[in-house]
Image: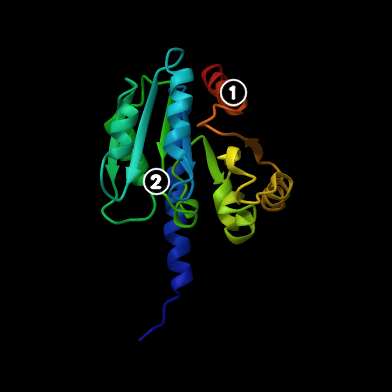
Amino acid sequence: MDKYNVVEIKEDITSRNNLFAKEIRKKLAEKKVFYLNVMASPGSGKTTLIVELLKRMKDDYKIGVIEADIDSSVDAETVSELGVRTLQMHTAGACHITCQMSYDALCALGYEDLDFVILENVGNLVCPAEFDTGATENLVLLSVPEGDDKPKKYPLMFRVADVVAVTKTDVAEVFDFDAETAKNNIKMRNEKATVFFLSAVKNDGVEELEKYLRTAIERVKNA
């Protein structure tokens, strides 16, 4: 019996996923839609930050949110209370979102008349980074309680990030978190990543990320 190479199989799956991702980005660009893939570990503050951004931006843009979870609809219920178009996606146990899943969710949401779509990916610092969702940009959250060393331990997640938001900065002293060390570790993995430090609960630093996103949305709309 001929032997087969597992690495080659994985590379083939990834390659096909990435080709489809390019097609999705083309479709989104044609409709002038900015699509943000938000990735982080569980409890990092993804939903809290998304809610704060929605409060600030929903009156100026047509926004849709895709909530990806293994189960439950807790986050979708929270987001939908703000009056934005919301879709709950269940992954049936999968720890990540593939490009096909991403596109199916976009179509079910109805993305073509939106300016801005946010995908809250499954809480995980490993698997989601391996699959391109077709998003315009990737936002990765690093929360203070996780520690400033996480970019060293999870390199791929930070390599694929366009933007990194260091969250929960209001508790930095409690967790002996060093902002400069965190930034250096992030830049070690990805020199091009834009880094923000913020606390969504305290409404501190969110404005800078909001400005970044507004600029990105306008750039897509005017392309």
In the picture, residue 58 is in which quadrant? top left
Rendered location of residue 223, percent (x, y): 56, 20
Rendered location of residue 32, percent (x, y): 47, 22
The answer to whether 136 is drawn above or below residue 154 in the figure is above
The answer to whether 21 is drawn above or below residue 218 in the figure is below
The reply to whether residue 164 is in sight is no
Q: From this viewpoint, which residue is outermost toward the front?
A: 174
Q: What residue is disc 1 on?
A: 207
Of 178 and 27, the residue lying toward us: 178
Numbered tag placed on residue 64 in the rendering: none
Q: What residue is disc 2 on?
A: 99
Q: Residue at x 44, y 23 (%)?
A: 54
Rendered location of residue 141, percent (x, y): 54, 43
Q: What amino acid does circle 2 point to?
A: Cys
Rendered location of residue 166, percent (x, y): 60, 41
Of 172 and 63, the residue lying toward us: 172
The reply to whether residue 106 is in sight is yes
Quadrant where the image shows the N terminus:
bottom left
- The Cα atoms of the two marked residues, 2 and 1, are separated by 30 Å
Circle 1 SS class: helix
Circle 2 SS class: helix
Foreground disc of the pair 2, 1: 1
- Mark 1 is surrounded, within 10 Å at the Cα level, by few (under 14), some (14 to 19) or many (20 or more) other residues, namely some
Q: What amino acid does circle 1 point to?
A: Glu
Of 38 and 136, the residue lying toward us: 38
Q: Residue at x 42, y 59 (%)?
A: 13
Which is more N-terminal, label 1 or label 2? 2
